[in-house]
Amino acid sequence: MLIGSVRTIFNRLPEMMVRLPVEAGGAVNETAEAVASAAQSNAPVDTGALRASIDVTKTGSTAAQVTTGVDYAIYQEYGTYKMPAHPFMTPAAEAERGRYLSRFQNLLQ
């Protein structure tokens, strides 16, 4: 049987609990803005309506959505049986995946 004691010399947990949601929200917003910017750059342009409709909406303190305001965006992204796909949103999100994960790893260190 092991008998002993644990002594806390330095406890940063209370500080982290206050800072983490704020910094996580910043990382989420930064990533969402980067995804929106890349999606706008990647979006196919005929009239420019699709590109102009890409927007970021903050949906919570640590949540955001990148959306489009045109109905045909999904057909551009995934294609139809009559036209090939011209993905713009998925590549933008995938390009930010690594940076997003790095931001959170840095927050936790």
Image: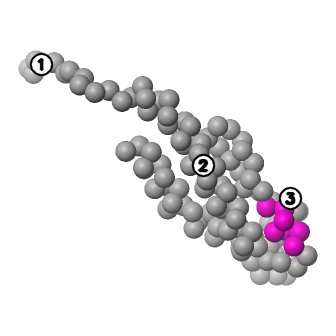
Q: Tag on residue 100?
A: none
Where does residue 97 sit, x and y in percent of width and height? 54, 61
The residue that label 2 is drawn on is: 28
Mark 3 touches mark 1? (CB < 8 Å): no
| Badge nearest the viewer, 3 or 2 | 2
Three-letter amino acid code at disc 1?
Answer: Gly
Q: Is residue 91 above or below residue 64?
A: below
Q: Is residue 67 above or below residue 109?
A: below
Q: Is residue 61 above or below residue 30?
A: above
Q: Tag on residue 4?
A: 1
Q: Earlier in the sequence, mark 3 or mark 2?
A: 2
Q: Secondary structure at mark 3?
A: loop
Q: Secondary structure at mark 2?
A: helix
The quadrant of the picture occupied by the N terminus is top left
The residue that label 3 is drawn on is: 69
Where does residue 58 sit, x and y in percent of width and height? 72, 44
In the displayed structure image, the side of residue 64 where residue 79 appears, left or right: right
The crowding category of the residue bearing disc 2, from other C-alpha atoms within 10 Å (few below 14, some 14 to 19, many at least 20), is: many
Q: Quadrant of residue 11?
A: top left
